[in-house]
Image (cartoon, coloured by chain):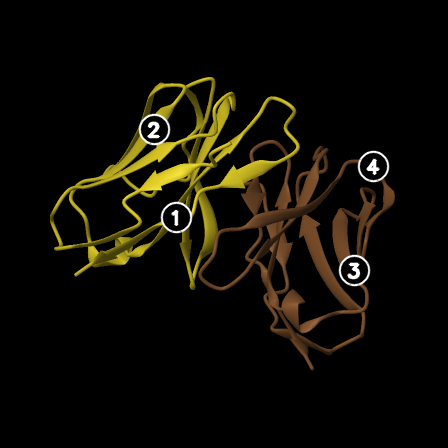
Chain colours: A yellow, B brown
Amino acid sequence: DAGVIQSPRHEVTEMGQEVTLRCKPISGHNSLFWYRQTMMRGLELLIYFNNNVPIDDSGMPEDRFSAKMPNASFSTLKIQPSEPRDSAVYFCASRDSSGNTIYFGEGSWLTVV
Amino acid sequence: QKEVEQNSGPLSVPEGAIASLNCTYSDRGSQSFFWYRQYSGKSPELIMFIYSNGDKEDGRFTAQLNKASQYVSLLIRDSQPSDSATYLCAVNNDMRFGAGTRLTVKP
C-alpha cells in the first residue's frame, strides 16, 4: 500500500512567487494534516481536515497561506506570495478513523530566495 | 492554545544505558498520547501510543503516562547508536507536537 505522497519533494523559488504543495493521503484515511518544520519552531501544525472539512486552521501563519481538500484523495497547501521566512520542510500526514497513528509523507523541502 | 512541552536537549547517553525522555501537556482533558522518532532528514514515524495511566512496554521502549501530573515519558532501555534521533511527543486528536528532544547515543 502506498504511503502519503507529497509533491514536489524539493522546490526553490523566488520571493513573491506562488508555491503550491500537493498531498495524496493514504486511501481510506479520513483525516489529513499539514505541518511545517523548521529548526527554530519545530514541527508546527498548520491545519487539519476531517472528512475533507477543515477542522482547525489556527496554525496557518497568515493570509498568504491557504489549504484546500477538494476530495478525499487530494489536498493542496498554497503560499502566495512566498517569502524567504517560509523556507521550511512541509509535511502532509493522514490518519484513519481509529485515530491511533498518523502517517507522514516524506515532506516537501521549500527554499524561498 | 494547548501546549505540549519537551526538553529540547540535546540528551546524550552511553550505549547500553537507559534514555529517559519527558513531555508535559497543558490540556487536562487530553486522552491520547504518542511518541514519534525522527531521524535527520526523514519524516517522523510512530514508536508508541498510550491512553491509560501507567506503563506500556514494547520491546526496549516503555511509555509512562501520569494524567494527574500531566506528563508522559518514554524510556529506551539498552540504548543503541541507532536510537540517535529526535523524539517527538504528540497529544490528542489534533496531533500537536512538542519541540522534540534530540537524543545521541554514544558508542
Q: Mark 1 belongs to which subunit?
A: A
Residue B10 in the image: above or below residue B48:
below
**Amino acid on which disc 3 is placed:** Leu
Same chain for mark 1 and mark 4? The answer is no
Callout 4: 10 Å neighbours few (<14), some, many (20+)?
some
Q: Secondary structure at mark 3?
A: strand
Residue A107: assigned label? 1
* Camera-nearest label, 1 or 4: 1
Q: Which residue: 47% across, 17% down?
A: A51
The residue at the point 65 percent across, 24 percent down is A98
Residue B42 appears left or right of B70? left
Residue B96's image quarter?
Answer: top right
Q: At x 51% / y 31%, what residue is drawn?
A: A1
- Residue closest to the eye, B21 or B107: B107
Residue B65 seen in the current view: yes
Q: Chain of mark 2?
A: A
First of labels 3, 4 by sequence position: 4
Mark 3 vs mark 2, CA separation in Å: 36 Å
Residue position for label 3: B75
Q: Which amino acid type is shown beneath numbered disc 2? A: Ser
Instruction: Please state if B64 lies on the left or on the right of A47 as rendered.
Output: right
Please tell me which residue lies in front, A49 or A102.
A102
Report which residue position mark 4 lands on.
B52
CA neighbours of label 3 inside 10 A, class few (<14), some (14 to 19), many (20+): some
Label 1 residue SS: loop
Q: Secondary structure at mark 4?
A: loop
Cβ–Cβ below 8 Å for labels 2 and 1? no
Residue at numbered disc 2: A75
Question: Which is in the foreground here, disc 3 or disc 4?
Answer: 3
* Nearer-the-camera pick, A85 or A29: A29
